[in-house]
């Protein structure tokens, strides 16, 4: 058996970048061939169910990365509250390349792809909101306010990503992360 040209993690990362930039409906198999360096037959060998399976693997990879590098800090009661917030915001900035990258939620929430991935998208958003809500409660906020702030944070992040992209001004995203930090400096 020949060795693989690209390991699984690198393959998923390259597919992720294509889906993130073009969306599920917009990315073609040719795009995926180009980004991965693999031929169509090799892609289908690794992902027999095609683009849907590739996207599911990307979603699992992203969920795992976000859980380990963002949500875990928000929920880690062994760290002081400021460190938790700083680490989470630092990794959010890293994940979105300081506002340059499109969010996978946005890339997959268009009509056709949303109907395929709605359950996974809802679970992902629920996990983000739940971690922010728990962080707010740990910070000492009333549970209702903690929930409101958690939703507000997600709206701010998603909105800032869109505005940064459209206006080509990453400082919008950077300022939004600072605003989120201030939201929790009550």
Image (cartoon, rainbow, N blue to C red):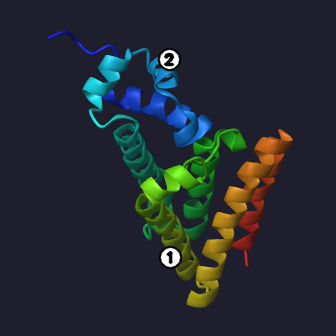
Residue 181: image quadrant is: bottom right
Looking at this rendering, what residue extends furthest in the front direction?
112
Vertical position of residue 132 compared to residue 143: above or below: above
In front here: 90 or 102?
A: 102
Question: What is the total number of numbered labels drawn onto the structure image?
Answer: 2
- The dot on residue 134 is 1
Q: Are marks 2 and 1 in contact (CB under 8 Å)?
A: no
Q: Is residue 79 visible?
A: no
Q: Height in image: 131 above or below 160?
A: below
Q: Nearer the viewer, residue 114 or 65?
A: 114
Looking at this view, name the residue that lies furthest to the left.
1
Can you identify the residue that label 2 sits on?
A: 34
Residue 49 visible in the displayed image: yes
How far across and down, in percent of the image, does residue 151 sit?
Answer: 63, 73
Q: Residue at left 70%, top 42%?
A: 98
**How many residues crowd mark 2 within 10 Å: few (<14), some (14–19), many (20+)?**
some
- Asked if residue 1 lies left or right of residue 153, the reply is left
Quadrant position of residue 20: top right
Q: Residue furthest top?
A: 2
Q: Nearer the viewer, residue 143 or 116?
A: 116
Q: Residue at x 60, y 81 (%)?
A: 146
**In percent of the image, x 61 and y 36: which residue is there?**
21
Answer above or below: position of 169 versus 148.
above
Residue 136, quarter of picture: bottom right
Describe the element under mark 2 as helix, strand or loop.
helix
Q: Position of residue 138 (x, y in %)?
A: 52, 79
Percent across and percent down for residue 59 are 42, 47
- The mark lying in front, picked from 2 and 1, is 2
Q: Quadrant of the N terminus?
A: top left
């Amino acid at each position: 058996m020949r060795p693989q040209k690209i390991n699984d993690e690198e393959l998923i990362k390259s597919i992720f970048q294509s889906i993130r930039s073009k969306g599920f409906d917009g990315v073609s198999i040719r795009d995926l061939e180009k980004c991965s360096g693999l031929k169509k037959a090799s892609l289908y060998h690794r992902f027999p169910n095609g683009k849907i399976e590739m996207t599911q693997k990307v979603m699992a990879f992203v969920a795992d990365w976000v859980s380990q590098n963002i949500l875990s800090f928000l929920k880690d009661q062994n760290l002081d509250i400021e460190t938790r917030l700083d680490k989470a915001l630092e990794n959010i900035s890293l994940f979105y390349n300081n506002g340059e990258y499109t969010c996978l939620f946005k890339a997959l929430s268009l009509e056709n792809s949303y109907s395929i991935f709605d359950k996974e998208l809802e679970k992902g958003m629920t996990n983000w909101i739940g971690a922010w809500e728990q962080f707010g409660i740990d910070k000492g906020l009333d549970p209702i306010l903690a929930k409101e702030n958690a939703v507000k944070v997600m709206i701010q992040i998603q909105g800032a990503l869109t505005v940064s992209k459209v206006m080509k001004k990453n400082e919008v995203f950077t300022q939004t992360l600072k605003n989120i930090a201030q939201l929790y400096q009550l």
